[in-house]
Image (cartoon, rainbow, N blue to C red):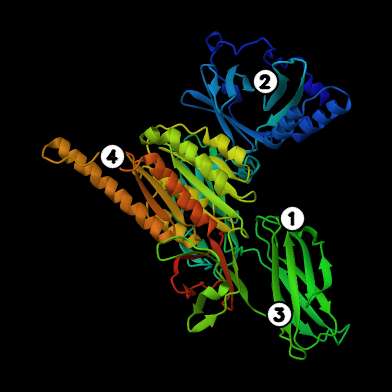
Amino acid sequence: MAALLAAPHLPSPKPVYGQDAAVPDPSAESAVSPAGVLGPWVLNEELSEDPVLKAGQAAREGRWTSSILQGEAASFADRRGAILIGVEDDSVLVLNGRGETRAFPLDGAWRSFDPGIQGRALGSNDTLSIETITGEWLGVDTFVREQEQLLRTTDLRSRRLGSVGLRFHTVYERPPTSDHSASDHPFVDTVRGFARPATILIVPPERGYRQLLSGRVGFQTLVIDPAVTAVKYRLDGRPPKRIRQPRYRTYIALDDPPREQTLEVLAYGAQGQLLGTDRLILNRIDGPATVHIASIRGKPEKDPTAVLVEATVPPPWSAHVERVEFYRNESLVAALEDFGKTTRTRPPQAIHVEALIESPQHHDFVRVRAKLADGRELEDAELLKEGDYEAEIDVRLVQVQVLVTDREGNPVSRLTPEDFEIREGNSRIKPEQLHTAKDIRLLLGLAIDSSESMRPAWSHLRHVVRSFLETSLAPEDRAFLVDVDDTVRFLQPPTADQHQLMAHLGQLVPGGGTALHDGLLFSLLQFRRESGRRALVVVTDGVDVDSRSRWQQAPDYAERLGIPIYFIELDRSAKPVIGTGSLAGRTSDAALRREQARRRLRRISRHTGGRHFHVDLVAHDTHWTRRIEEAFHQIEEDLRHQHMLTYYTEQPPDAPAEAGIRVIRQGLKLRSAVPLWTLE
């Protein structure tokens, strides 16, 4: 490794500018043409230095290293797992392993990203150098192509104290790709966050709540990359089925009776190169986080006076189970913490635990409490009736996201389970618990239309969105960011790091057309593996001219998944022209299209339990900046008053949940009630 990293053919990094150095004049630098380093690269951990260890070693050896530099080393280590370098229009794009993208002008000019952050790219065919200035710190990344390896030298230096800094080396290799083998998939799994989220996504087929799929089922792939010319569907690793039709729809025969199966789709370009892939687990029911007493059995062989209590904890994707406790009334009987490999698999496996309750008395309670790594605690309880133990308690927990308002439409809080009535058929079901928004983590999607027509409101809009994210998200909540113009870009995958969200929000630049329906469907598909509270906020001018998907798909999918959609429509259209002639006709047609688009947004928001806000950028009665702020404030209020209502049903897992829910407290109205579920 040492010989490789110290090889004489490695070029030195670009000069580090000292205290008196100014930012160089870009006109004196060469343009960027890094054809040899383009494409995806994955980390060779064995041949690469560990930035964190190297920073720690420098500190132990007495070399002065700033805490900022050590933090930068840790940040770099978190983002270096993969890298994708590409060219789009007049920019070279660099995408790291966290899905963060920066675009540098091909002419070598400096570009500002956030206040105090500048960067530029320089290079030739097999070399690329990225320079980034953050305050007094300069980072220089030099990429050199060596056959099928990419050698990266990273220099972090103080512009004021040139001797203060760190240097470490990273080695990347080409990901394994093959047009005819199973190695197609390690490419996307390893470089997850590159082509996969931004190129294609499988649109789950229509079905009832938790309904299993079997027989001949129609599937469609959402393609938002115009470079894709064909896709292949593969079920459980069987030979792929190639589709070239523009909508990429097909029918696939699933097993009957239904079972868990894996559907994969691979997207290819005109030259047969793999551009992206997606995978969907069919017939997996990943329920909400819960603990469930599965059975209470009397007179075990070891102790005839005791009962054996068995419990199941099906953890969600988003959390691990740390501890399960068994109580007899208020007394702790057993505590379990070692669950083997079941908690570390993906998807996480259900945990089955049991404990012996000795000498139960009449009307004793047994309680089982599960503690998750994210701080949540789940509990189930059953009455121990001496001599009359149930062999099996065959029930399952259902979670419903509800929003309740008063007569004026304002969301309310301070509700109790007794404020709700639940019915399945002719049976009345007792509500189990009612959790507030503080109890359940939120996943917030934010899709922003960055088309040219949004430019007049852009500066104020970014400011308001920043404030909305800061005030709406609790520390444990997460959000993602989608950019929509004439195509769709996944700027930030779900994260709780608000700094990352703000940084990517600052990268949005208005221009181009609008593919609103594609962006809406793409955003909704990001929720399919997520549990907990959810909501999608879409800021747009409402007019779609570039989408490839049908507009009906997004609202249908949102209703099935239980995602309330909030639209903030920014309207800068002129008032209709009164009179005759071609100008009046064109204006009338444009007004008609806009009104049709507005009706669609209203319908989608109403059917999904969200809201539609129309902000007229031309009206003079109330300044439009105030209207945008008010819209975001009302959305924030809705999110803060979301509740999670739970109840137990005896319906089997594959049966539709068609319970009728209503609010019985006088003066209140149930605005939305959607069962929460995931598709993987």
Q: Residue 357 appears at what percent x and percent y?
A: 82, 79
| Residue at 66% across, 67% down | 290
Labels 1 and 2 touching (C-beta < 8 A): no
Could you tell which of marks 4 and 3 lies nearer the N-terminus? Answer: 3
Between label 1 and label 4, give the one nearer the viewer.
4
- In space, the residues marked 4 and 3 are separated at their CA atoms by 62 Å
Q: Which mark is residue 573?
A: 4
At a point 75% along the width and 86% down the height, the residue shown is: 363
- Disc 3 marks a residue whose amino acid type is Glu
Helix, strand or loop at disc 1? Answer: helix
What is the number of the mark on residue 136? Answer: 2
The answer to whether residue 87 is above or below residue 530 is above
Q: Quadrant of residue 149?
A: top right
**Residue 525 seen in render:** yes
Res 382 label? 3
User: In which quarter of the view is residue 172 placed?
Assistant: top right
Q: Quadrant of the C terminus?
A: bottom right
Few, some or many C-alpha atoms within 10 Å of disc 1 (few <14, some 14-19, many ≥20)?
Answer: few
Question: Which is nearer the N-term, disc 2 or disc 3?
Answer: 2
Front-lying residue, 414 or 322: 414
In three-dimensional space, the C-alpha distance between marks 1 and 4, rounded to whole angstroms, equals 54 Å
Residue 20 sits above or below residue 244 on the image: above
Sequence-wise first label, 2 or 4: 2
- SS at circle 4: loop
Give the crowd class for mark 4: few <14, some 14-19, many >=20 residues within 10 Å: some
Amino acid type of the residue that numbered disc 1 sits on in the rendered structure: Arg
**Tag 1–tag 3 contact (CB < 8 Å):** no
Contact (Cβ within 8 Å) of mark 2 with mark 3: no
**Extreme-front residue of the structure:** 621
Query: Tag 4: residue type?
Result: Ser
Residue 344 circle label: 1
